[in-house]
Amino acid sequence: MSSRGRLALCAFAATLMAAASMLPLVEPAGWILQAAFLLAVQSGMGALVRRAPVPRVLVIAVQALFTLVLLTVVFAREQALAGVLPGPEAVQRLAHLLASGAEDVGRYATPAPVTDGIRLMLIGGVLLIGLAVDALAVTFRSAAPAGLPLLALYSVAAGLSEGGADWLWFLLAAGGYLLLLLAEGRDRLSQWGRVFSGAASRSPGGPAVGAAISSGRPTAPVRTGRRIGALALGVALVVPAALPALEGGMLFGAGGGGNGKGGGGTISAVNPLVSLQDNLNQPENQQVMSYRTNSGTPQDFYLRILALDQFNGSEWRPSTRRLRDVPKRLPDPEGLGPDVAVTEVRTNISASRSYQQTYLPLPYPATEVKVDGRWRYEPAGRTLVGDRGETTRGAQYQVSSLVVEPTAEQLAAAGPAPAALRREYTRVPGSLPKVVEETANKVTRGAANDYERAVKLQNYFAFDGGFTYDTSVNSGTGSAAISRFLKDKQGFCIHFSFSMAAMARTLGIPARVAVGFTPGTGQPDGSVSVGLRDAHAWPELFFEGVGWTRFEPTPTRGSTPQYTQQDVPTGDTEVPALPEKGSSAAPSIAPSVPDSCPAQLRKQGECGSSAAPGVTPPTDSGTPTSTVVGLVLLATVILALPLLPLLWRLRARRHRLSLSAGRTSVRGRAAAPPTGRGTTGTDRYHGIEPDQAPDSTTAVSPAAP
């Protein structure tokens, strides 16, 4: 094998070994095989182009264009020209997938599902790093700087990982880089000729020939490679430890406090696949927020985070919509008519500092929100989204919302939904198994209207169908997962809500899935505590004249809405007592005060102050100065790393020039060596004494003049 071929093979191996550190971030891990194949094809194209006498820059350009073609064939073949060439539509498709992948990264906690967007980001990132490593190590014959892209790839994975076998991925990445350095060192040594390392010959009275080069000391290039390798490995060890804690979703998976996996027991993102199931299985129901409300129906007081309204066959996800500034009063709920009874209530919510994500939990439908910070409003889902890093951590806010109380008659008499809304929220993928629609038709047989169909679906899952609530069942939201759930009849809120929403859509009923929290647990002081185990998902169905309406198909969770019960109470049911008039008739602006703060909040130091007249602003002082200084120094070291080989060469060049000047001076003083001196032929040729031979001489021609 040629030296370039050996270097190309080692560059491929080093990139793939560093990419293995990304395996714990997503599941399943089949993407690594696809990335390895495409990386091998990319490396082979570079080897093929380098066989021709073309400029190095052209080699890199050809590899980059070929990489774009590979990504187009894999991810945008239908939009490509002739199924191969990346035209405008293919580029637009790739850009859309990248944007979708960026949203998925912010939404899911590790290990995240491999959506199309995340797969493109993973494979495209590996190919980009592989191109940089191949260009530096093979095309430009400089393997030491190739450690920088490898370090970047490993650092991203180490910063996002939640622990586990991090040492294994570090050893793999470091081993790949050392393999690349060894391959380059062997290549350079092979170009120097034969190195004298055996016994030295002596002249009759002189020292050994090549004493300096056989002294056993490491040569200058070897010492340089060792130093660069040690420095790069040191940076690789320091960078992950120095990275600031990132919280909220896949990029923010490390939260504080709590037990269990998934960010220390905190809900770090809206992640029905991973985060919600992890929270439901926590050994301790850690509090994430508390609230006070004057609502007369606390059993129906769900706190909603966002709605998942797109079902593409592999997952439910929220649509990408334009955000706007939060209005002083939110618009009227979509579809709500004037005949439906509503009551406006006020609630004060205090989020724990261990609860950090970008969506603000709100009762639905909220009409007014008073909260400090940078928040934006998404009208379709009536949600508030944090802007520029704003999260719920430690947030205290006041919400006015409506308690909507439709009757069964109003729901049964609901007219058809608007055409545009009906098209959007009844769309189902072609991959949805026929058994889903068949089961929906079978369960709702005999129903006279959409309301009766929706109630039959709810009761089928909650009471009549023989389903069992089990949080240990493997997560899944795709078409196959729904079909499996209908067969096995075991799952938790994700399976119940996603399956009912999909079945409702097959019946022509607009449906989506809401994610948030059940009402929580009342405390002796009148507040309500919401914990990790209160995380929940439920379907929302649209009825014209009422709007988006909650249903509860999950058995033993939450509460069944009264408007879905066959025997609706007529007034005999005891009405929950409203708060006493006086200081507690309207909720306090500060959700908790020192005298009435629950013990758990008091232990966490999150009790508000009664002296504060308004909502308490966040108390986080920002990133510590020492962290900022450390990151600046680290960035300086990383930026200076590529300059080390250049600085070392300049130093060696100055050293050689000084030695050359000394030789010229010696030649000027001694035009001819004195007779009778015991010098070797090599020493007489250079005109210097044996003890003046430079230490840097490491190799000589096999035959001296």
Image: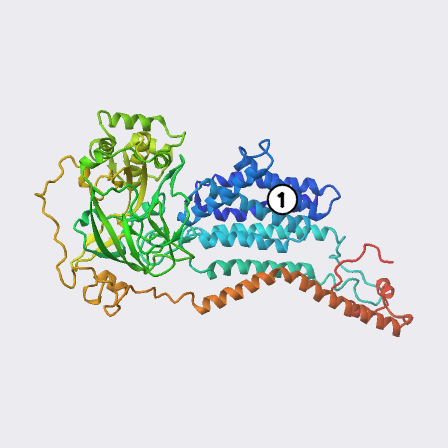
Instruction: State the residue at coordinates (43%, 67%).
Output: 624
**Which residue is at the front of the view, 191 or 200?**
191
The image quadrant that residue 496 belongs to is top left
Front residue (pair 634, 395): 395
Instruction: Answer above or below: position of 476 versus 367.
Output: above
Q: Does the rendering let one see residue 100?
A: yes
Q: Amino acid at mark 1?
A: Ala
Quadrant containing the N terminus is top right
The percent coordinates of residue 271 (x first, y second) are: 36, 46
Residue underneath mark 1: 64
Q: In the shown orientation, is residue 666 left or right of residue 574?
A: right
> Left of 172 or right of it: where is 592?
left
**Residue 326 screen position, x and y as percent:** 35, 54
Measuring 19% from the left and 47% from the top, which residue is drawn there? 299
Category of crowding for the residue at label 1, using alpha-carbon neighbours closer than 10 angstroms: few (below 14), some (14–19), many (at least 20): some
> In terms of secondary structure, where does tag 1 sit?
helix
Picture coordinates of residue 5, whole percent (x, y): 67, 43
